[in-house]
Amino acid sequence: MTEAPPRRDPYVAVLATRQDAGAGAAPPGVDPGEFRLALLEDTYEIAAGLDLVTPALVLDPPDQPDAEAVTWPGTPIVREPTLTGAFTALHALGATEAVLLAADAPDLPGLHIGKLLRALGHAPAAACRADGGGLVALAARLPLPDWLAAALRETGLDTPDALARLRAAAPRPGLVPQGPAWHRLRTRDDLGRLDPGLEGWENTRALLEGRPLSR
């Protein structure tokens, strides 16, 4: 009997790419650094809780022991300053598909990630646009096509017109489909987008306990 080939699950990596990511959304009385780590941990738990995926962490700057401490033992750690570098490193680990997540989306439904991965069945990349500009998540088949690798060297999830840039770089329309949009927690006003009825985001929820979410 021929042995089945080893399964290569998609990688879902959280980008801890700025040490102030999410800190600006901290409400009065909450330490910004602690709030940033709560957002990061909750976003990581989304990835870690998905079936048939491998969670990972991307660090830039590369030395962030506090960020590494929120991950499960054995989590792959990538130290890369660009999305191109992150995707390339995940491919070197064996991934043929990967999703990169912004670290300030603690209540992102896992279904949104699943829709991006399904879109890779007919496109080389797929994006979840962030309300207010930029991206919440970007999925890609690996290795990256040359046009996408070049575009991602100059484009990050925080780039306001990231989706438009990627689509403009594509050699033909339809190569970067868009999944449902979602929000990120970048300012205090964004806290009003959190839905207490949604499961998850436990660390963020604990820091916000007793504080109104309305704007």
Image: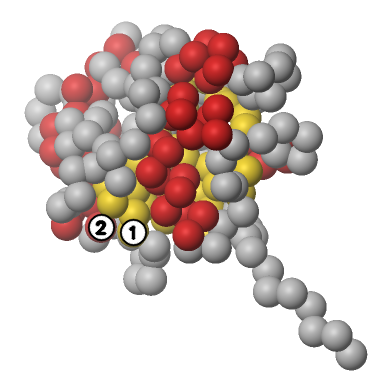
Return the residue at label 1. Answer: 77
**Chosen colour scheme:** secondary structure
Q: Residue furthest front?
A: 146
Question: Which residue does the image show at 28% across and 51% down from the upper left?
Answer: 79
Q: Residue furthest bottom?
A: 1
Q: Residues within 10 Å of mark 1 (few under 14, many from 20)?
A: some
Give whichever of 194, 138 is nearer the camera: 138
Q: Residue furthest right?
A: 1
Q: Look at the numbered discs 2 and 1 and tell me whether their residues touch, using CB distance below 8 Å.
A: yes
| Secondary element at image label 2 | helix
Q: Determine which quarter of the picture holds residue 188.
A: top left
Amino acid of disc 2 = Glu
Q: x, y (%) of residue 100?
A: 47, 40
Q: x, y (%) of residue 49?
A: 53, 55
In the picture, which quadrant includes the N terminus?
bottom right
Q: Is residue 95 left or right of residue 175?
A: left
Question: Which residue does the image show at 14% across and 32% down from the upper left?
Answer: 32
Q: x, y (%) of residue 27?
A: 19, 23
User: Which disc number belongs to residue 171?
Assistant: none
In the picture, which quadrant includes the C terminus?
top left
Q: Determine which quarter of the picture holds residue 61.
A: top left
Return the residue at label 2. Answer: 68
